[in-house]
Amino acid sequence: MSTFNTEAIVLAKLPLFEADRQYILYTPGYGKLEARVKSAALSSSKLAGSLEPISLALVMIARGKTRETVAGAQLIKRFNFDNLAHFGQLGLIRELFLKLVPREVPEAALYNNLSAYLNALEKCSETHLARFLTVRFIWQMLRILGYGLDFPGYFKQPLDKNFSSSGQALFKSCFNSGRSSSAVSGSALAEVENFTKAQLLGFLERDLFSYKFLPSTV
């Protein structure tokens, strides 16, 4: 049985068998991993405490014939979010990783973007800015994953068919790294969020559960 060590962002944990749990990890060199932790639901588990979503950990992964297993874990950082509204944004990002990101396809740029997003969201106190950070991350994520986003040529209609002038400016800023909180207006943000939601539903061809827990922007 071969093993390897990697830094990983813990995205989710799911029930598996009785007391076991399956952890969804995103790593810089191996992409998305799904790894089992034996007896993780028991209070005696030595690994579970280092693998709570959303956290950053150093993990040892043991490859098996049918599945990977977490053989060791050391907590590096547990992200803390004081604003409860941020959890809805996180839920959407986590669901997109589960549904859009293929297993074991490394994308270092996506890992770096996810790390930067979590650190920025953790420090963010403004709800509007947090929502913008999320929608910006989504569009950069789609571009990295190769969804044909040759911006703006990807879009079949001119941007003014979907956005006001302020909405256009905000949408274009999703494709670069700099944006101040003072520049994010509510109406423009709603336009970008609604457009993003429609595009995601088109890509996935099914609804996203997380949107039920986000405030309507219509």
Image: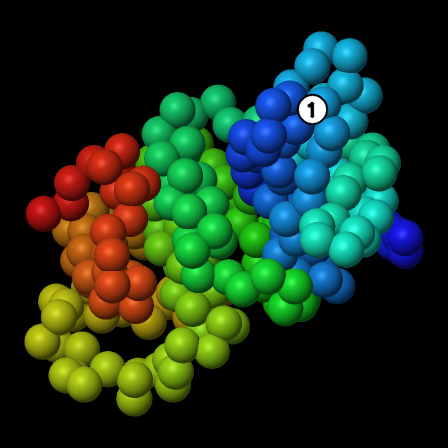
Residue at 75 percent across and 63 percent down: it is 29
133 shown above or below 121 = below
| Residue placed most toward the observer, 49 or 113 | 49
Residue at 57 percent across and 53 percent down: it is 114
Query: Mark 1 highlights which residue?
Result: 40
Task: Give coordinates of residue 214: x percent, y percent.
Answer: 26, 37
| Residue placed most toward the observer, 177 or 140 | 140
Indicate left or right for 194 with 213 as reference: left
Residue at 74 percent across and 49 percent down: it is 68
Q: Residue furthest bottom?
A: 153
Q: Residue furthest top?
A: 43
Residue at 81 percent across and 21 percent down: it is 46
By what rule are the colours in the image chosen?
Answer: rainbow
Q: Dot 1 lies on which element?
A: loop
| Residue placed most toward the observer, 134 or 75 | 75
213 shown above or below 104 = above
Q: Residue furthest right?
A: 2
Indicate left or right for 136 with 115 as reference: left
Indicate left or right for 117 with 148 as reference: right
